[in-house]
Image (cartoon, rainbow, N blue to C red):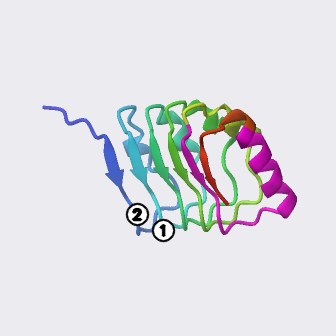
Amino acid sequence: MDRIVQRLYLNDNAFTEIPAWFTQASLHILNMNNNPLENILAITSLVNLQWLYLSNTSLSFIPATIDRLQKLEYLFLSNNKLFYLPTNMLNLVNLKQLELQNNLFSPADIQTFQTEFAKSHPNMILII
């Protein structure tokens, strides 16, 4: 019998990228917190993802193709090295919570995020 993986917790490991062996469309929750991630491009193949934990991973960029994750509701990106967010993130229509604190965003960037997400996602919780 084939097993369908819907939740995968790989936090607190040494992954530097999203492993190709689990890019399953059935995955709903992925926790990669506390990994030294350098490349998350494979994340966009996880089209049914609803919860994505990428805090404390040293990430410096989010791929512009992040908007392929149309079912994404919760995105945790705190404590990284992010200094830019792709505008495509505004296309994540189901996003309910976005956590961005302790990154490298300028005060102007933070103001822009607050303004743009307030327009596109008025009920979303934005933590910066």
Residue 125 position within the rendered picture, expressed as x and y whole percent measured from the top left: 59, 49
Question: Which quarter of the picture shows residue 24?
Answer: top left
| Residue 36 on the magenta segment | no
Residue 42 position within the rendered picture, expressed as x and y whole percent measured from the top left: 53, 42
Stretch of the chain drawn in magenta? 95-118
Q: Which label is found at residue 11?
A: 2
The quarter of the picture where the C terminus appears is bottom right
| Residue 111 on the magenta segment | yes
Q: Callout 2: 10 Å neighbours few (<14), some, many (20+)?
A: some
Residue in the picture at 60% in, 40% down: 123
Question: In the image, is 66 to the left or to the right of 36?
Answer: right
The quarter of the picture where the N terminus appears is top left
Q: Callout 1: 10 Å neighbours few (<14), some, many (20+)?
A: many
Amino acid marked by disc 2: Asn
Whole-angstrom CA distance, mark 2 to mark 1, is: 6 Å
Residue assigned mark 1? 34
Nearer to us in this view, 81 or 78: 78
Residue in the picture at 69% in, 60% down: 60
Residue 71 position within the rendered picture, expressed as x and y whole percent measured from the top left: 49, 32
Query: Mark 2 or mark 1, which has the lower sequence index?
Result: 2
Callouts 2 and 1 close, C-beta under 8 Å: yes
